[in-house]
Amino acid sequence: MKQKIDVILNYFNNQFPDAKCELEYNSPYQLLVAVILSAQCTDKRVNIVTKELFKVAPTPIKMLELGEERLKQIIHSCGFYNNKSKSIISATKSIIDNHNGEIPNNMEQLSSLNGVGRKTANVVLSEAFKQPAIAVDTHVHRVSKRLGLTSLNSTPEKCEQDLLKIVPPSAQAKFHIQTVWFGRYFCKSLNPKCEDCKLKSICKRK
């Protein structure tokens, strides 16, 4: 497995040397909000929405002042706006009441916020706080199964644990982003660009 992950990491580093999170934000709080909005929505759409949202609600206090109904109107085009607005407002209240308005920098406290699961928490930990972490979204899960880094019937939680065992801590944050890019632009769910992929020899997709 070490040889396989070395091959994958080298390929990703050559293919996506400048890969970075495509969500636009100016603080850990804004990143958290953007990640919540990104569920089943494109980063491009989220960035359009947050450009307007963060003009009026860039901080937890301003978000509560904005209120849930106005928030729904602004984030409507992201989809699932009722649930997302409830999660954002609830998490924001907890951040203010329990964390002095600051985003917690550990998994236990982050994942205790309403609407914040392991994937969202891992994105914040790795991106905002530069901690070793691998967020397993739909792209990471799909690519990991195809490349044999986790079993074909694994859950996102099992996939995360499998990846943490084989990806060096120093490479985990970048691996997550590179895998997202690979899954988003090449190893797509439908019509992946297999003919151009140098990893097809180890791919389990038939």
Image (cartoon, grey):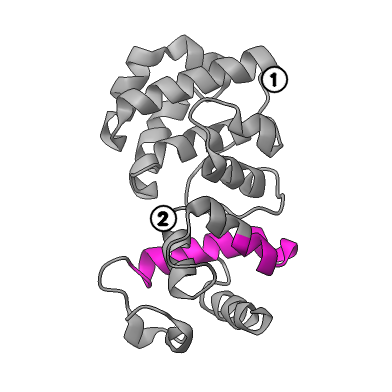
Q: Nearer the viewer, mark 2 or mark 1?
A: 2
User: Which residue is label 2 attached to?
Assistant: 138
Q: State which quadrant residue 11 falls in.
A: bottom right
Residue at the image position 54 percent from the left and 59 percent from the top: 159
Q: Nearer the viewer, residue 88 or 145?
A: 145
Residue at the image position 43 percent from the left and 67 percent from the top: 152
Q: Report the number of numbered marks.
A: 2
The magenta span reads 162-188
Quadrant occupied by the N terminus: bottom right
Q: State which quadrant residue 101 falls in.
A: top right
User: Which residue is label 1 attached to?
Assistant: 99
How far across and how far down the image is residue 90, in percent? 50, 18
Quadrant occupied by the C terminus: bottom left
Residue at the image position 68 percent from the left and 79 percent from the top: 2
N-terminal of the two: label 2 or label 1?
A: 1
Residue at the image position 48 percent from the left and 10 percent from the top: 65
Magenta segment main secondary structure:
helix
Find out whether residue 12 is within the magenta segment: no
Q: Name the element at disc 2.
A: helix
Whether residue 135 is situated above or below residue 113 in the rendered picture: below
**Lateral position of residue 90 relative to residue 122, left or right:** left
Q: Name the element at disc 1.
A: helix
Residue 19, numbered label: none
Q: State which quadrant residue 78 falls in.
A: top left
